[in-house]
Image (cartoon, grey):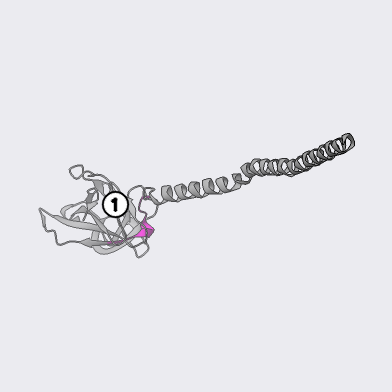
């Protein structure tokens, strides 16, 4: 009977050791899985950086586009304008009051601000005749005029008859050369008048542009 009891004890001990070994074997894959999971979480951080950078670049480009679209328009130059003269304003004491009109014929909005430069020209080639127009201080600038495509601005132009001056050497003018404020190029407006060759005689005065 003692031998049978001892044998049963050995069998129980062997079974217990086998069970412990099996449990230890099952624990190893669990640790490996945890390690892999940890590596995956760790590696996910840098992987998101390019996406964040791309989003930042997109937002920056969008902000730049918005800023450029809201930029203030530039000054009008002669190449953007067409000119005309309305001489139906009447006159008195040898003076004729006219409207100098400029129209934005471009596809861009521009600003016109202040007095234009105006001279009589002739000889069929734009030769200036006499003195340029004086600025009329009683007609100062009312501020910048925004000209959208197709919009117009006007300035009052006063012309004194050349015949009012005894010392005037009269010369026919083909029209007017007009420099927009701050522009370095000019436009020609055909409008026959009579000028004086003498630069000491000022036949023209001009007011600042205002919105039509």
Q: Which of 131 and 115 is in front in this view?
A: 115
Residue 206 visible? The answer is yes
Please check the rendered image and state whether residue 184 is part of the magenta-colored stretch, yes or no.
Answer: no
Magenta part of the protein: which range?
74-83
Q: Nearer the viewer, residue 135 or 123?
A: 135
Identify the image quadrant of the C terminus. bottom left
**As drawn, is 53 to the left or to the right of 210?**
right
Residue at x-position 14% and y-position 62%? 88
Q: What element carries label 1?
A: strand
Residue ID for mark 1: 146
**As drawn, is 63 to the left or to the right of 147?**
right
Residue at x-position 22% and y-position 43%? 140
Farthest residue in the left direction?
92
Residue 117 position in % (x across, y down): 31, 50
Residue 198 visible? The answer is no
Q: Nearer the viewer, residue 89 or 167?
A: 89
The answer to whether residue 126 is above or below residue 25 is below
Residue at x-position 83% and y-position 39%? 8
Please check the rendered image and state whether residue 80 is part of the magenta-colored stretch, yes or no.
Answer: yes
Farthest residue in the front direction?
1
Residue 188 position in % (x across, y down): 33, 61
Q: Which of 141 and 135 is in front in this view?
A: 141
Residue 128 position in % (x across, y down): 33, 55
Residue at x-position 60% and y-position 44%? 49
């Amino acid at each position: 009977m003692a031998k049978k009891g001892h044998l049963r004890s050995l069998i129980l001990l062997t079974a217990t050791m086998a069970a412990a070994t099996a449990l230890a074997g099952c624990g190893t894959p669990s640790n490996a899985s945890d390690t892999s999971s940890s590596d995956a979480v760790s590696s996910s951080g840098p992987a998101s950086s390019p996406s964040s950078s791309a989003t930042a670049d997109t937002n920056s480009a969008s902000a730049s586009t918005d800023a450029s679209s809201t930029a203030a328009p530039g000054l009008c130059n002669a190449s953007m304008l067409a000119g005309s003269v309305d001489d139906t304003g009447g006159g008195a004491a040898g003076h004729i009051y006219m409207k100098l009109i400029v129209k934005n014929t471009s596809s861009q909005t521009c600003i016109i601000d202040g007095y234009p430069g105006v001279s009589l020209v002739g000889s069929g080639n734009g030769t200036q005749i006499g003195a340029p127009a004086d600025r009329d201080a009683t007609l100062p600038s009312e501020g910048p005029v925004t000209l959208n495509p197709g919009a117009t601005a006007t300035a009052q132009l006063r012309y004194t008859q050349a015949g009012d001056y005894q010392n005037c050497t009269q010369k026919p003018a083909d029209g007017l050369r007009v420099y927009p404020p701050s522009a370095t190029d000019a436009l020609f407006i055909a409008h026959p008048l009579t000028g004086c060759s003498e630069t000491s005689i000022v036949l023209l005065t001009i007011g600042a542009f205002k919105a039509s």
